[in-house]
Image: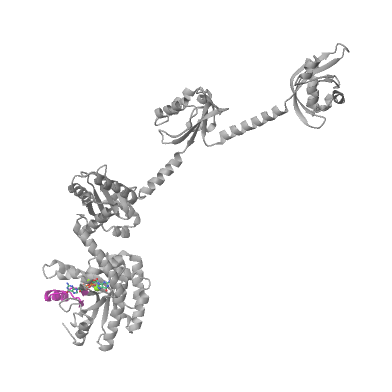
Amino acid sequence: MRQLVGNLREGVYVTDLDGRILDANAAFLEMFGVASLEEMKRYNAYDLFVDPEQRTRQLDVLIRQGAVRQFEIQIRRPDGEIRTMMDASTTVRDPDSDEVVFHGILVDITDRTRSEEELSRTLSLLSATLDSTADGILVVDGDGRIATYNRRFVEMWRIPDEIVASRDDSRALAYVLDQLQDPEGFVRKVRELYAAPEAESHDELLFKDGRVFERYSMPQRIGGRSVGRVWSFRDVTKRKAAEQQLVHGAYHDALTNLPNRSLFTDLLSRSIGRAQRRESYAYAVLFLDIDRFKVVNDSLGHLVGDQLLVAMARRLERCVRPGDTVARLGGDEFTILLDDIDAVSDATRIADRIRRELRVPFSLGGQEVFSSASIGIALSATGYERPDDLLRDADLAMYRAKALGKGRYEVFDTEMHARAVALLQLETDLRRAVERDEFCVFYQPVVSLRTGRPIGFEALARWQHPQRGLVLPDEFIPVAEETGLIVPIDRRVLREACRQLGEWQAGFATEPPLTMSVNLSAKQLLQPDLVDQIARCLDATGLAPERLRLEVTESAIIDHAEPALAMLGRLRALGVRLDLDDFGTGYCSLSYLHRFDMDTLKIDRSFVSNIGDRGQNSEIVRTIVSLARNLEMAVIAEGVETAEQLALVRSLDCEQMQGFLFAEPLPAGAAAAMITAKARW
Ligand code: C2E
Ligand code: MG
Ligand code: MG
């Protein structure tokens, strides 16, 4: 028996009631790090307890119940190391000495305790993580029953507590399925994964109420064997919405919510491709620009302008068929892609429908606003390869529609293209002309109707084209204005006209001294150094400022009202005179006219030229003259060609006139001759 006990791995011992160690096996000695029984006997077992309290409690149980089982104690070994042991001991009466002793068995559980502690720490960490994560987590065992889940899971799926607590997966599943857009798909995926215990998966779940969850699934493994499955759900509704917003925003116009240029171009590319593959397929692009949108913006404000764009978008959408696309290209420009049309008439019919639709006024911010649009149409028949080419041609056709009187449509034809090419050529030529200074100035007399004598001249630009000879302003001024080349041209004319007047002045003094009228384009009017430029010209030529008359058109001012008015104020301060050119052709509201503070009104020649024929225009001229009187402005009648017209403007009390009847614009030499000849009407 002693040998048997000696071989046990558990420590076996005998002590008396006072804690003296009477006997112990080898395992016991080893547990205490003591070499021999003799040495061990030198220690009292009670002294080895770390906590005397613990010893008292153990003794108490032992004496009252005769035995202790599984009593955990802390022992300090003679070498000082502290170990945790599990003690089981009994009181026994020693038959030899008839004394009561304790027989005990000790197991060192220090290592086990330590790993248990670690395990529970890990477990608590895991469960804290599980409950603090933003993901909903569900663990299902091998039989498909709910093993565990976190709080977030229950919240996300809005499952009543009692259902989850019941661990009944079929009830929970029914609850889950009811919320999904595609419950069958969900079940299919779950089945698939149960059939493949090792598989991982990741997909998205769409809810009936619009929420979106990401779903991850992974097998739960123990020792490499899968024993269940972990499902993790993440609510990505907000992120998805933001992503969609981003994608939508990249392809849509924020104001009208219509497709923007890049989406339109994409769609158009697709149509182009289809047309190349299928001969029978045809499409059309409508390019639409709101007429006088600027007037709405300037007079009613940007807010109303924006409202008009939105309302326009909605109306355009009403005019097209379901497969067609209405897009906003930018500003007041819209494009429409008509998909799969049979004939040109399909496109023109839509254009007509839009025109009809626009006859009804828009009601914006409590006001009725009438608006029309000019529409250009380009057809696939021309064999396009790039979206930009189509847009360009539809745009050209739109410009044509505008030029022909607005509120109408034009279908692109090759002649328009030829015209556009010619325009481009003109632009190139004009650039070169500015570089080489191919411009000269002609002078048309401004005649006093009282004396019949020239009181001054209007400087008019002429382009001495190396091949084409003299080119008139009507042909190149619009292009020059569009390209900005007008600025150097105007500057050149201004300088030359002042120089010329200075020369005439020195040569032959007239009484009253001659004036010089110079035209200013809108672009020139907005040049910040314009006042300096003019002051320098006056300085260089010694002219008094009031001898210079600057001609500005209504539209030049209206288009940039505030800065233009500010500039007019500075020019006035300089002392030069200001004339309103081409009066009656712009959209000058009378309230504006009063703010302009101009010296003279020039009645546009279109009114003067017709007064002979029918009475109507003479009434307009009469009205303009009396308007000028009320505003204390002088009046010049432009374009007087016949004696009849002259008689009429004279009878209407105009002070001055210009016209072929007296003289056409002349080269400087001829104009000088006219002064010296003291020509008079
Ligand atoms: P505008 O300032 O109204 O100039 C008067 C135009 O009417 C001139 O045309 C002149 O030749 C024309 N005209 C004068 N009397 C008669 C007439 O009895 N019958 C007819 N049918 N026409 C008459 P022009 O020189 O061809 O200039 C056209 C326009 O080009 C000018 O209209 C002006 O707006 C612009 N322009 C001319 N030179 C310049 C310039 O140096 N700078 C700027 N910015 N514009 C200029
Ligand atoms: Mg003029
Ligand atoms: Mg004029």
Q: Is residue 423 above or below residue 90?
A: below
Q: Which colour scheme is used?
A: one colour
Would you say 209 lies left or right of 669 here?
right
Would you say 487 lies left or right of 676 here?
right
Which residue is farthest right? 97
Q: Is residue 554 visible?
A: no
Relative depth, front residue between 627 and 507: 507
Q: Where is residue 238 in the image (x, y as percent from the top left)?
A: 45, 41
What residue lies at 42% left-to-right and 27% top-to-bottom?
188
Relative depth, front residue between 192 and 669: 192
Q: Is residue 471 above or below residue 360?
A: below
Task: Examine the structure image and report whether residue 641 is included in the region drawn in magenta.
Answer: yes
**Which quarter of the picture shows residue 184?**
top left
Relative depth, front residue between 174 and 50: 50
- Total residue callouts: 0
Would you say 614 lies left or right of 518 here?
left
Magenta residues (range): 636-657
Q: Where is residue 590 in the image (x, y as percent from the top left)?
A: 27, 65
**Which quarter of the picture shows residue 453?**
bottom left
Q: Can residue 606 be seen in this view?
A: yes
**Which quarter of the picture shows residue 488?**
bottom left
Q: Is residue 450 above or below residue 593?
A: below
Task: Examine the structure image and report whether residue 113 is included in the region drawn in magenta.
Answer: no
What residue lies at 38% left-to-right and 48% top-to-bottom?
250
Q: Where is residue 68 in the image (x, y as percent from the top left)?
A: 76, 18
Q: Where is residue 480 in the image (x, y as percent from the top left)?
A: 28, 68
The quarter of the rendered structure image containing the N terminus is: top right
What residue lies at 63% left-to-right and 32% top-to-bottom?
122
Would you say 158 lies left or right of 16 here?
left
The quarter of the rendered structure image containing the C terminus is: bottom left
